[in-house]
Image: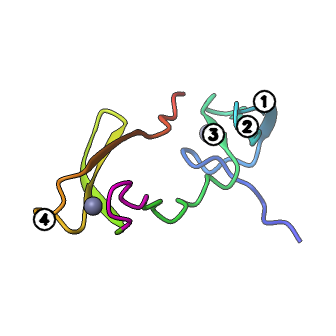
Amino acid sequence: MKDSLRCPRCQSEALYRYGFTPSGKQRYLCVVCQHQFVEHPARKPPEVRPSCPRCGQPMHVYMRRGGVVRFRCTRYPECRTYLKIRAEVSRS
Ligand SMILES: [Zn+2]
Ligand SMILES: [Zn+2]
């Protein structure tokens, strides 16, 4: 079964397969408005929570900025371990 795919911008069904994204998803180009989009945009995976390299407790998101996520140990302030992880930034 297949849902009919529509342009998210103009709802047109006149779509052109336009190669693949770097992550391997089918990319479409709307013939009507030239909008490019990806079928079924990735559902956000559950937040990856690293565990604290020092005490083994889970870490939680402390700050997100500019594609970088900072995690802080849930035992803060007892444990002041931070982690900085670069999140994938999708560019169009
Ligand atoms: Zn369109
Ligand atoms: Zn810790």
Gap between marks 1 and 2, in whole Å? 5 Å
Q: Is residue 51 magenta?
A: yes
Q: Quadrant of the N terminus?
A: bottom right
Residues at circles 3 and 2 in contact by the CB criterion of under 8 Å: yes
Measured in 3D between alpha carbons, the distance from the residue under mark 1 to the one under mark 4, in whole angstroms, is 52 Å
Q: CA distance from mark 3 to mark 2?
A: 6 Å
Asked whether mark 3 and ligand 1 are closer than 8 Å, the reply comes as no
Closer to the camera in the image, 72 or 37 = 72
Count of numbered badges drawn on the protein: 4
Query: Residue 18, which numbered label?
Result: 1
> What residue type is disc 3 on?
Phe
Mark 1, secondary structure of its residue? strand
Place of residue 36 in the rendered image (x, y in percent of width and height, measured from the top left)? 63, 33
Residue at horizontal 24 percent and vertical 67 percent from the top: 74
Q: CA distance from mark 3 to mark 4?
A: 46 Å
Q: Which residue is mark 3?
A: 37
* Element at label 3: strand
- Place residue 65 in its image quadrant: top left
At a point 72% along the width and 32% down the height, the residue shown is 31
Magenta highlight range: 50-56
Give the residue number, with chain letter if any, for mark 2. 27
**Above-or-below relation of 28 to 8:** above
* Mark 4 beta carbon near ligand 2 (under 8 Å): yes
